[in-house]
């Protein structure tokens, strides 16, 4: 991690300055790690910028070395913020370009969303710190103005501080001041602090623009992602519905086969019953008829035998 030409230069990776759309998960995490380092660098710079503002406010006349250091650090931080924003936008675009069935897509989206949230929080923190320092510089200018013009009202002070020609405004008040020495020193500091406030206001304006760009990016990315998620949910519902239809079809087929087997068993049972009835109807008569002839012959023999006996008796 280093600064070159006032900007952040990440270490080159296997895919150059950013991950390839078809890069493996480790390469994606390398890019995520690079962005995390950049966000951490910005956070450290914000702390240092706040310290330099406090040092500047602690002196009556602004130190030139502190001023140059603050300007350089502010410019470097601005460059890193822009580069970080661009990297996050590239990751978002790469995620949208991947097919919905990509195995690591959920991991990519979660990591990118986390980076985006951390970046927005860092922007908000930087903006709050710059706003607080602006108020401190303004309060310092109010005190210096009262040195030049002790009887000035708050409305008059606000009008002087909000005027871009505040230096001339203070110079005019200086001519009417009875405390010329102190007023002259106060005028010089007011002019310096007014320049500092203008620089802070420029930084705040840039941070607001960055924040709005990221918010617009979130809204622009959320719409396609929501569409993809809705499509995925619909596909899941369709698959579940298809599975239910298949299960019902299998149950219906199983029920149909069961009914066929039942019908077959009933038919076989009917055939067996018909066969038994036919058998009993035809063969029972034959068996019964044969038994009747035997009985009649036996009775005939019995009636003849006594008649023979009566003839032979004396």
Image (cartoon, grey):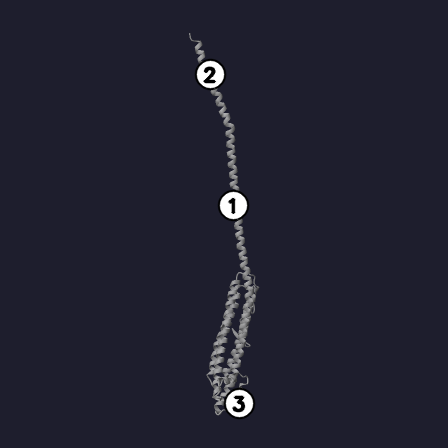
- Can residue 87 be seen here? The reply is no
Q: Determine whether the residue tagged by mark 3 lies in a helix, strand or loop.
A: helix
- Residue at x-position 50% and y-position 34%: 273
Tell me whether circle 1 and circle 2 mark residues in contact (CB < 8 Å): no
Label 3 – label 2 distance at C-alpha: 172 Å
Q: Position of residue 195 (x, y in %)?
A: 53, 83
Image disc number at residue 255: 1
Where is the C terminus found, in terms of image quarters? top left
Q: Position of residue 73 (x, y in %)?
A: 51, 78
Q: Position of residue 255 (x, y in %)?
A: 52, 45
Q: Position of residue 220 (x, y in %)?
A: 56, 67
Image disc number at residue 186: none
Q: Determine whether the residue tagged by mark 1 lies in a helix, strand or loop.
A: helix
Image disc number at residue 301: 2
Figure quadrant of residue 165: bottom right
Give the class, few, some or many, for how many residues have Cα within 10 Å of label 3's Cα (few <14, many ≥20). Answer: few
Q: Earlier in the sequence, mark 1 or mark 3?
A: 3
Q: Earlier in the sequence, mark 3 or mark 2?
A: 3
How many discs mark residues in the rendered view? Answer: 3
Label 1 – label 3 distance at C-alpha: 103 Å
- Residue farthest left in this picture: 314
- Can residue 257 be seen here? The reply is yes
Residue marked by disc 3: 172
Give the class, few, some or many, for how many residues have Cα within 10 Å of label 2's Cα (few <14, many ≥20). Answer: few
- 179 shown above or below 55: below
Give the class, few, some or many, for how many residues have Cα within 10 Å of label 1's Cα (few <14, many ≥20). Answer: few
Q: Determine whether the residue tagged by mark 2 lies in a helix, strand or loop.
A: helix
Q: Earlier in the sequence, mark 1 or mark 2?
A: 1
> In this orientation, which residue lies closer to the viewer: 279 or 107?
279
């Amino acid at each position: 991690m280093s600064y070159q030409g006032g900007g952040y230069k990440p270490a080159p990776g296997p895919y150059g300055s950013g991950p390839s759309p078809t890069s493996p998960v480790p390469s994606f995490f390398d890019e995520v790690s690079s962005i995390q380092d950049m966000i951490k660098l910005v956070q450290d710079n914000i702390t240092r910028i706040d310290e330099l503002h406090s040092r500047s406010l602690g002196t009556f006349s602004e130190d030139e070395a502190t001023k140059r250091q603050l300007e350089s650090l502010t410019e470097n931080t601005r460059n890193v913020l822009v580069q970080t924003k661009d990297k996050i936008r590239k990751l978002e675009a790469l995620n949208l370009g991947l097919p919905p069935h990509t195995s690591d897509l959920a991991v990519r989206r979660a990591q990118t969303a986390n980076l985006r949230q951390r970046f927005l929080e860092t922007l908000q923190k930087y903006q709050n710190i710059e706003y607080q320092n602006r108020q401190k510089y303004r309060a310092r200018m109010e005190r210096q103005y009262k040195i030049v013009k002790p009887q000035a009202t708050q409305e008059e002070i606000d009008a002087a501080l909000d005027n871009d020609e505040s230096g001339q405004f203070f110079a005019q008040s200086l001519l009417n001041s009875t405390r010329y020495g102190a007023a002259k020193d106060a005028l010089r500091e007011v002019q310096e602090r007014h320049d500092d406030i203008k620089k802070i206001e420029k930084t705040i304006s840039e941070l607001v623009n960055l924040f709005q760009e990221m918010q617009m990016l979130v809204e622009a990315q959320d719409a396609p992602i929501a569409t993809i998620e809705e499509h995925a949910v619909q596909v899941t519902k369709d698959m579940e519905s298809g599975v239910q239809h298949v299960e019902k079809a299998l149950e219906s087929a199983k029920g149909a086969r069961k009914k066929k087997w039942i019908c077959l068993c009933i038919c076989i049972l009917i055939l067996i019953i018909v066969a038994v009835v036919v058998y009993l109807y035809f063969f029972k008569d034959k068996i019964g008829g044969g038994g009747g002839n035997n009985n009649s012959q036996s009775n005939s023999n019995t009636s003849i035998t006594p008649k023979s006996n009566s003839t032979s008796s004396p």
